Image (tube, rainbow, N blue to C red):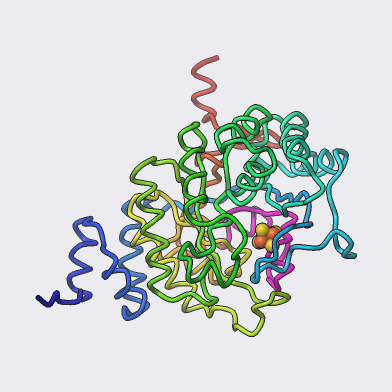
Amino acid sequence: MTINPPTIRDIEAKVQTGERLTFDDGIFLDERADLFTLGRLANLVRERKNGNAAYYNTNIHLNPTNVCVYRCRFCAFRADLRDEKAYAFTDEMLRERILEGRSQGATEIHVVGGLHHQKSFDWYVNVVRVLHETCPEIHVKAWTPVEIHWFSYLTKKPYDWVLQQMLDAGLGSMPGGGAEIFHPEVRDQICEHKADSSSWIDIHRTAHGLGLRSNATMLYGHVEQARHRIDHLLQLRALQDETGGFQTFIPLAFHPENTKLDHIPKPTGMMDLRMVALSRLMLDNFDHIKAYWIMLGEKIAQVALGFGADDLDGTVVHELIYHDAGAKTPEGLTVAHIHRLIREAGRDPIERDTLYRRVYRDGAHWSVTAPRETAATT
Ligand code: SF4
């Protein structure tokens, strides 16, 4: 029996009625749908879920060390211990960084880094503790499953134990990195040593079971093909069906500069927009799709707000990982500029905290409680 391949009309009918798209639908959309049809359908879902809102947050980044035991072929950030650029933060540097975040009104600090072979698990727990104790009002979003997997290896303890130590130290949620492309055909070529897809999934499952929220990513535009991307998205969708713990999905464009894959050209703007739209359509159980302006550039990220994305990430001060790989974007954007990007895209800017609660500001103070609600209760 021959099963007819999907047509764009079939897929459009499914999107209109909210019916779930299949693997074959995904392949069709990825490989054959024209960009504007893809964008129109993704925008339909985006507006159904988030109306005209476009979210951003005020955040600061921290990469506590770039020394790493692994050598992922797409990574320009890592260093060997004796490299000139190798570094590891001291407690004083951690305090300085988060106090800088406080002075800029940050609601979140995003923390990921290398797996330093001379640092113990306690050193990593201490990073979270120092940040949390210095500025308890700033949400600490830290460690990808690659790091949690490493900590489990160091301590010989299960993931839930490792995560509980981090929670006790002040961890607020987990970012979505380290996913790259789940399929082993790709993973074996670009990051053969680090945590595999089943570990990545299992760690997020465990985190969600402990009440932590997290994000998810996919690194596209290197050696992968459409079938690997759709497989990746469907694995994320299945875990979200099971736990509901993911908040947002971030398609990450590969940046080749200074990596072992520097012979591969950077994804084009067309591919970037396709990936945003495709993600929005396939991940029907994710509330948010982020156009991460650091990687996409401000202009594509702005256009992406009409192709399925409802979030631009944030002010992002001190981003290193993608700038080491050649990202030409500035190292931070002002809130005024983010507002301009969003308003010119015809959307309404809404500042959110890490958990997507609306942030209200009054001078240097911020709160996730609406001023009227405060007045009513005092
Ligand atoms: S991507 Fe992460 S795990 Fe891989 S080499 Fe870079 S820092 Fe290390």
Q: Quadrant of residue 85?
A: bottom right
Q: Position of residue 136 (x, y in %)?
A: 70, 29
Residue drawn 34% across the image and 50% down it: 285
Residue in front for this viewpoint, 5 or 62: 5
- For this orientation, the residue located farthest to the front is 156
Q: Is residue 261 left or right of residue 356?
A: right
Q: From what the image shows, is residue 88 above or below residue 229?
A: above
Classify the position of the C terminus by image quarter: top right
Q: Position of residue 55 (x, y in %)?
A: 51, 51
Residue in front for this viewpoint, 117 or 106: 117
- For this orientation, the residue located farthest to the top is 378
Classify the position of the N terminus by image quarter: bottom left
Q: Is residue 83 left or right of residue 355?
A: right
Please state the quadrant of the image where ligand 1 appears: bottom right
Q: From what the image shows, is residue 378 above or below residue 125?
A: above
Residue drawn 49% across the image and 38% down it: 206
Q: Is residue 79 left or right of residue 34?
A: right
Q: Is residue 2 left or right of residue 351?
A: left
Q: Position of residue 30 (x, y in %)?
A: 36, 74
Residue 323 lies in the magenta-colored region: yes
Residue in front for this viewpoint, 321 or 160: 160
Residue drawn 24% across the image and 62% down it: 15
Q: Position of residue 24 (x, y in %)?
A: 27, 70
Residue 87 lies in the magenta-colored region: no
Magenta stretch in the rendered image: 313-340
